[in-house]
Image (spheres, helix red, strand yellow):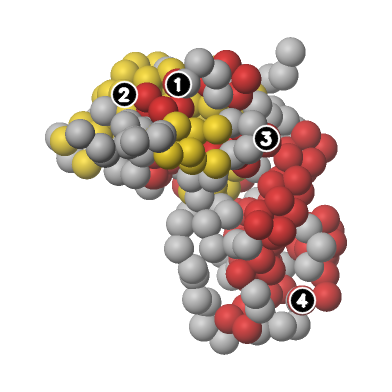
Amino acid sequence: MNETILYTQKLSVGYGEKTVVSDIDLSAAAGQLLCLIGPNGAGKSTLLKTLIRALPPVRGEIMLAGRALRDYRERELARLCAAVLTGKPEPELMRCGEVVAAGRYPYTGRLGLLTEKDRRVVREMMEKVGIAALAERDFTRVSDGQRQRVLLARALCQQPRLLVLDEPTSFLDIRHKLEFLRLLRALSKERQIAVVMSMHELELAERFADTLLCIKDGRVDRSGAPAEIFSGGYIDSLYGMETGSYESLFGTYRKRKNAGVT
């Protein structure tokens, strides 16, 4: 059985005293992908930000590597947890190799100087994700798919036990979505990293996730293996599909005949 890296107990997340999602019990194991799905605005990003301590929990407990998340010092936490969040970062005047090297900050001294070991880790991670040739390229002048790989390499340079990603394939075309997720799954198993991510592409969540956590109406509506979640018309209920249904076999939305006709 894979080691549990992250788990929560009766966790509620939100902003200030406003709760967005309540009573969350989840666990993420080494070498596995836990994927959050659910309607827009359900609170997936809020949950992810809470798991990396970018937001304080409203209530409840988060345990990382057997220790309460709140007890970690910042540098300690950065050695255990890495994140790639939504948006297109635009580091000014930085080459791709420099962006990746920024992932070594939890291990450098106060001056931020890289040792030979740090440089070796940077080279290794760039090779792992297939971007070694981009080291001297301007980060703002590479493709979206290449940027995502650069950011993944930066996160891997932290050598984390937990990797959190918010909609990591949003800006990619289908080819690069598939390449990125295949790479992510392979690396999670090879390096025994627990991955927690949110996704909108249901067909990809079904294909690549080990476990799905479904969020709706301020709560965890259901969790389980993809085969369990994508059966019995549950996805239609999760997303409130009133005029059609999700065809899991084809990964498409199918409008019902006479939908909307009274």
Residue at 60% in and 62% down: 172
Q: Is residue 140 visible?
A: yes
Q: What secondary structure is found at the residue carrying circle 4?
A: helix
What is the CA distance from the residue labelled 4 to the residue labelled 1? 43 Å
- Amino acid bearing label 4: Leu
What is the CA distance from the residue labelled 2 to the residue labelled 4? 42 Å
- Amino acid bearing label 2: Arg
Q: Nearer the viewer, mark 1 or mark 2?
A: 1
Label 1: how many Cα within 10 Å (few below 14, some 14–19, many 20+)? some
Residue at 59% in and 39% down: 251
Label annotation for residue 213: none
- Amino acid bearing label 3: Arg
What is the CA distance from the residue labelled 1 to the residue labelled 2? 16 Å
- Tell me which label, 3 or 1, sits earlier in the chain: 3
What is the CA distance from the residue labelled 3 to the residue labelled 1? 17 Å
- Tell me which label, 3 or 2, sits earlier in the chain: 3
Label annotation for residue 134: 4
- Tell me which label, 2 or 4, sits earlier in the chain: 4
Residue under pointer 2: 219
- Amino acid bearing label 1: Tyr
Residue under pointer 3: 207
Residue under pointer 1: 234
Give the side of residue 50 with respect to residue 29, left or right. Answer: left
